[in-house]
Image: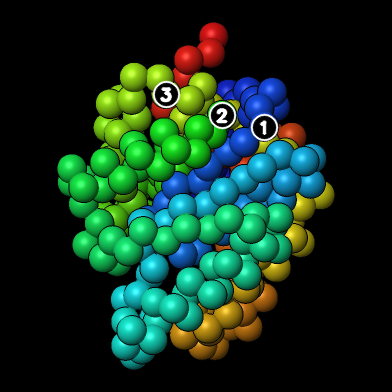
Amino acid sequence: MSTPVAPAAPLPFPADWDSLLVLVPHPDDPEYGTAAAVAKWTAAGKTVRYALASSGEVGIAGMAPEQAGPLREDEQRRAAAIVGVGDVDFWGFPDSKIHNTAALRGKIASVISEVRPDVVVTIYGGAEFRPGAPNQRDHIEFAAAVTDAWDSLSDPPPWLFQNGPEPTHAEMVGDYLDTAVDSLAAHEVYLSVLDPSTPVREQAGAVVAMTTSGHARGPAAGFILQRSTQR
Ligand SMILES: [Zn+2]
């Protein structure tokens, strides 16, 4: 087995911005790779907001959507608060049925126009995280909707990134790993049903380690530049 190696030296993630909007389809998506960087950014005084297309209501096996949706929203708000994010919005699109529709693109475009962030970070939209590890259809559809919505804006923000493999840009997060683990572990019911045999904090630690490793200079959150008005 060979260890996956990141492509030649990603650039440092931009630092000259004040506000960032994280756009994802489901609760826990911000905690699978982005939350450690969010903790660093908010600690530096930057403003980060989350907006989620769905409430993840079909994500807890054996639990009715009417019960799971509000529960997962609560867990997401707690996870966000741990990394300094107080503004979390849920749009009510149906979990597991996210499609790149005019309605979704319209919502994304209107939220970006309203919030006017300097940076947008969204979910990885590639087909596979690595060979044999396919991405989820909701993620692929949502990421495509974000790019399409972006391209419809007459005055888009300076930067659009996806959080994912083979990054073009990296944020070093070595000091924020514990905070990121706490943030993911806030999805307590979700994780305990997902894997009943592994303690929640242990699951969270494994995910944070996996999503921040493989970088030459230490633990990092990786981002793939999609659009930029900067040079
Ligand atoms: Zn997801």
Residue 54 in picture, x, y percent from top left: 35, 63
- Nearest the eye: 125 or 195: 125
Helix, strand, or loop for circle 1? loop
Residue under pointer 3? 156
User: Can residue 157 be spotted in the picture?
Assistant: yes
* Sequence-earlier tag: 3 or 2: 2
Report, in whole angstroms, how far the alpha carbon at label 2 lies from the one at label 1: 7 Å
Q: Is residue 40 above or below residue 166?
A: below
Residues under numbered marks 2 and 1 in contact, where contact means CB atoms less than 8 Å apart: yes
In the rendered view, does 62 fall on the left or right side of 223? left
Q: Is residue 171 above or below residue 98?
A: above
Q: Quadrant of residue 61?
A: bottom left
Q: Is residue 219 above or below residue 32?
A: above
Q: Is residue 222 above or below residue 91?
A: above
- Nearest the eye: 102 or 63: 102
Report, in whole angstroms, how far the alpha carbon at label 3 lies from the one at label 1: 16 Å
Residue under pointer 1? 18
In the rendered view, does 11 fall on the left or right side of 189? right
- Nearest the eye: 5 or 175: 175
Amino acid bearing label 1: Asp
